[in-house]
C-alpha cells in the first residue's frame, strides 16, 4: 500500500521574494500540517476509543454534539439500515460517536451526501459482542452498492476500495483520508477493527464513488 505524506511541501520562494513573504509562506504550511495532524488524532479517537465499542463511555471533558439529519444509510449486502446523525468536533478537538451503536455519524464539516466534490465522512460503531451497525464493514466487497437516502433524493454509491490502517498510518495519511480538496466527491465509511480483548488496533475504511442520484419514493401515509 503506497504511503502518502499529508504534509504540504513548503513553497519555494519566488525570485525577488522578501524574507518576510518567505517566512509567512513557510509558517502557513506548518499551520496546515498542524491542523491535519490534530484532525487525524481526533478522528482516530472517535473510532478507536472505548466509545467506539461501548457507546455509554464518553471521553471526560467532551461535549456531545449529535443532531438528527434527514439522511439514512442502507447497505443491503451487510444488512446495514441506519439513521445518520450529525457529529461535530468538540472544543477539545474530539469527535464524539453517536450514543446509539445502531446509528452512524456523518462528520458535519465534511461534504454533505449528494455533494459533487469533497469527501463525505461517515463513521459507525463496531461492537465486539455484536450490535454495531458497522460490525462487518471490513467484509464489504468491491462493487457493493451503498445508498444514502435523503429527503428528496437517494444517492447511490459503489464501493471501490476496502482496507485497514494502523493508528500511525491514519495519522500520516490524514490529508488523503479526511481532506476536502477533492474535485469529485468520494464517500468514506470508517469503523474500528482488530479487537484484542482490550482495544482496537486498526481502522477499517471503505471508499465509494457516487454513481447516480434518483428521486426518493414518497413514503406511504
Image (tube, rainbow, N blue to C red):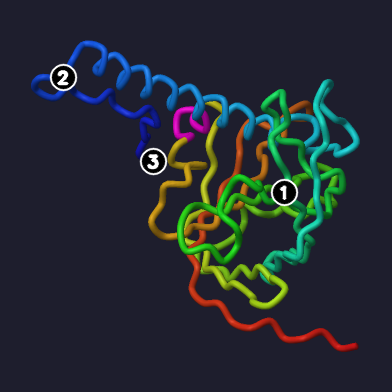
Horizontal arrangement in the rendering, residue 119 relative to residue 45 (left or right): left
Q: Is residue 48 magenta?
A: no
Residue 170 is inside the magenta segment? yes
Residue sitting at x 82%, y 31%: 63
Q: Which mark is residue 1?
A: 3
The C terminus: image quadrant: bottom right
Which of the 4 image quadrants contains residue 52? top right
Image quarter (top left, top right, bottom left or bottom right) of the N terminus: top left
Judging depth in this view, the residue of 23 and 47 nearest the camera is 23
Distance of label 1 from label 3 (alpha carbons): 24 Å
Residue that numbered label 1 is attached to? 124
Q: Which residues are magenta?
A: 169-174
Give the left or right position of residue 164, taking residue 74 as reference.
left
- Classify mark 1: residues with Cα within 10 Å, few (<14), some (14-19) or many (20+): many
Location of mark 2 (residue): 17
Task: Determine the image quadrant of residue 103.
Answer: bottom right
Farthest residue, direction bottom: 220
Amino acid at each position: 500500500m503506497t504511503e502518502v505524506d499529508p504534509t504540504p511541501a513548503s513553497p519555494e520562494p519566488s525570485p525577488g521574494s522578501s524574507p518576510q513573504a518567505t517566512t509567512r509562506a513557510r509558517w502557513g504550511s506548518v499551520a496546515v500540517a498542524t491542523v491535519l495532524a490534530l484532525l487525524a488524532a481526533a478522528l482516530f479517537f472517535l473510532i478507536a476509543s472505548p466509545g467506539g465499542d461501548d457507546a455509554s463511555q464518553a471521553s471526560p471533558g467532551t461535549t456531545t454534539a449529535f443532531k438528527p439529519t434527514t439522511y439514512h444509510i442502507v447497505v443491503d449486502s451487510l444488512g446495514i439500515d441506519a439513521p445518520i446523525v450529525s457529529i461535530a468536533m468538540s472544543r477539545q478537538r474530539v469527535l464524539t460517536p453517536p450514543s446509539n451503536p445502531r446509528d452512524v455519524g456523518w462528520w458535519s464539516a465534511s461534504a454533505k451526501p449528494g455533494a459533487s466534490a469533497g469527501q463525505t465522512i461517515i463513521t459507525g460503531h463496531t461492537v465486539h459482542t455484536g450490535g454495531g451497525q458497522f460490525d462487518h464493514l471490513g467484509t464489504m466487497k468491491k462493487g457493493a452498492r451503498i445508498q444514502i437516502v435523503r429527503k428528496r433524493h437517494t444517492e447511490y454509491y459503489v464501493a471501490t476500495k476496502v482496507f485497514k490502517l494502523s493508528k500511525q498510518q491514519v495519522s500520516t495519511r490524514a490529508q488523503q483520508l479526511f481532506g476536502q480538496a477533492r474535485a469529485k466527491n468520494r464517500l468514506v465509511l470508517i469503523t474500528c477493527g482488530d479487537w484484542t480483548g482490550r482495544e482496537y488496533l486498526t481502522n477499517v475504511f471503505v471508499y465509494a464513488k457516487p454513481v447516480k442520484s434518483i428521486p426518493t419514493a414518497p413514503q406511504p401515509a
